[in-house]
Image: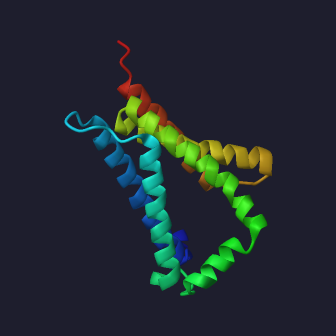
Amino acid sequence: MNSFSTTSPVALISLGILLVEHCTTVTLTRYVSQRVDAPRPASSVAVLVTELLKALLSVALELTACGGLGTRSSPGEMVTSVLGRRTELLRVSVPALLYTVQNNLVYVALGCLEMVTFQVLYQVKLLLTALLAVFFLGQRLSAQRWFALLVLTAGVIIVELSTSDTP
């Protein structure tokens, strides 16, 4: 059975939104950083604007229940739900802070690497995440997932070797 047939439409819509957001962000960031005729925005400002846009999109999706996403709750209910649980708010604040640091480092990397090299190397985080989940969390991955991770790693190595400047 195809794994996509058992995946919920909400997960597929979310994946599509995240894919478009990530590819657009990386492409536009690289384009803006290579312009010579205009000043470059500070990476922290670009990260802030990106995160604010994502927050607005998230709130809009939550309030409208678009495509199975969201609950159609009122703005007051949503604020109470988020701010009413201070422990949960603190718990998600740590990864959010780390994510912001990561996004700032992405801008540094985009300024130093070719876009294709960056995109390929950025995918190595999947392999690292899988290895950490196995070693620290004791999770088990299927043979199919290990194979996919090995193919991804091989692709990263091939691209890096093909773009190296060594004679």
Is 15 drawn above or below residue 5 in the view shown?
above
Q: Where is residue 29 in the image (x, y as percent from the top left)?
A: 35, 45
Q: Is residue 41 above or below residue 2?
A: above
Which quarter of the image is occupied by the C terminus? Answer: top left
Colour theme: rainbow
Left or right, 94 with reference to 59: right
Asked whether, in this view, residue 114 is left or right of residue 7, the answer is left
Q: Position of residue 145 (x, y in %)?
A: 61, 53
Tell me if I can see residue 151 in this picture. Answer: no
Q: Quadrant of residue 160?
A: top left
Q: State left or right for residue 76 relative to residue 166.
A: right
x%, y% of residue 19?
43, 59
Left or right: where 66 falls relative to 165:
right
Residue for point 22% across, 33% down: 36
Name the residue at 43% across, 32% down. Answer: 158
* Residue 69: image location, x then y, percent: 52, 79
Quarter of the N terminus within the rendering: bottom right
Q: How many labels does the image show?
A: 0
Q: Considering depth in this image, is 12 or 148 the residue closer to the camera?
A: 12
List the single residue furthest toward the top.
167
Figure quadrant of residue 161: top left
> What residue is drawn where x is 40% and y is 36%?
110
Which residue appears farthest toward the left when viewing the image? 37
Query: Is residue 77 something one can see in this rendering?
Result: yes
